[in-house]
Image (spheres, rainbow, N blue to C red):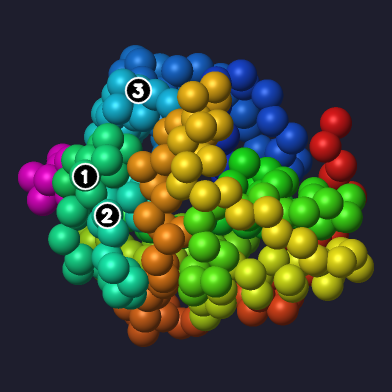
Amino acid sequence: MATVELLAAGGHRVRVVNRSGRAEVPAGVEVLGGDAADPAFSKNAAAGAAVLYQCLNPPYTRWPELFPSLQAGVLDGAAAAGARLVAMENLYMYGPTEGAPLTEDLPHAATGRKGRTRAKMAQDLLEVHRAGKVRVVIGRASDYFGPHGRLSAMGERVFDSALSGKKAQVMGNPNHLHTYSYIPDIAKGLVILGEHGEADGQAWHLPNAPAITTRQFIEQVYVAAGTEPGIQAMSRFLVKMVGLLNGTVRELYEMLYEFEEPFVVDSTKFERAFGDHATPLSEAIPATVEWFRTHPKS
């Protein structure tokens, strides 16, 4: 939605594609509902497009089963339309780095099922580009926060908790450095990639503010919310126990390494090519608190 808002504000004709065909969008934006894994639907949805922004996600518990077919459908649509594809990815393909900064040239060494799925999908995208079938560029971001960002490591379990004066719930060790990506900055980065054909055929880490520890991040959230900070950190054992009853938490278990070692994302490549577009955390965190304040969970 942040990408949609930026594109619409820039005067572009925009079509949003989702399952339901319903969304709160800026005036003039078209919303189309359907299954992007269906090649016929994807070709129809992409008709007339110059650029496709692939920000789709299947249910977290069914990545290996559903995600590759979603991407394949989008690629079919892009190929039929002759459109460039800007693919949004996370960082699962790299796997643990023992605290070393994440750069785009790291090997794809993930061993978990979601990390392997993401690595294979990234490889497929670049192979399609090299084969000349679709022009592809990839934008990657870390754990996100910001307006609309409820389901995230820095989502409602932190921001809603801060506003209500409860303890923030986090996984792993909150004293490690961790890069958190601001949703409007992710959108800005994707739009920039969509406007620069020279970026094609590559992966780019989207703009990030300098990493701070998860504890420092949460403390800033509580200062902005005007409440006393508190953190409830879930150990590996507790995550595993909760996962016995909750499928989403069970899927998070293989990703715990992100929160048990420094997780610092280097976006220098993007900054050198397109400038520094990262919003300082001192601005992004209060803006996110205000969004959660004015959009209480129903």
- Label placed on residue 95: 2
Q: Which residue is mark 3?
A: 66
Residue 159 appears in which quarter of the rendering? bottom right
- In the image, what residue type sits under mark 3? Leu
Measured as percent of width and height from the top left, residue 265 is found at 40, 70
Measured as percent of width and height from the top left, residue 174 is found at 57, 65
Is the C terminus in the top left, top right, bottom left or bottom right quadrant?
Answer: top right
- In the image, what residue type sits under mark 1? Thr
- The relative height of residue 177 versus residue 92 in the rendered view (above or below) is below
Q: Are marks 1 and 2 in contact (CB under 8 Å)?
A: yes
- The relative height of residue 35 versus residue 105 in the rendered view (above or below) is above
The residue nearer to you, when weighing 141 against 136, is 141
- In the image, what residue type sits under mark 2? Gly
Residue plotted at (46% across, 59% down): 259
Residue plotted at (30% across, 27% down): 64
N-term mark: 3 or 1? 3
Q: Residues within 10 Å of mark 3 (few under 14, many from 20)?
A: some
Q: Residues within 10 Å of mark 1 (few under 14, many from 20)?
A: some
In the rendered image, is residue 86 in sight?
no
Measured as percent of width and height from the top left, residue 260 is found at 43, 60
Is the N terminus in the top left, top right, bottom left or bottom right quadrant?
Answer: top right
N-term mark: 2 or 3? 3
Whether residue 225 appears in magenta in the rendering, the answer is no
Q: Which residues are magenta?
A: 124-133
Residue 49 appears in which quarter of the rendering? top left
Q: Is residue 167 left or right of residue 19?
A: right
- Label placed on residue 111: 1
The residue nearer to you, when weighing 247 against 121, is 247
The residue nearer to you, when weighing 254 against 2, is 254
C-alpha span from label 3 to label 1: 19 Å
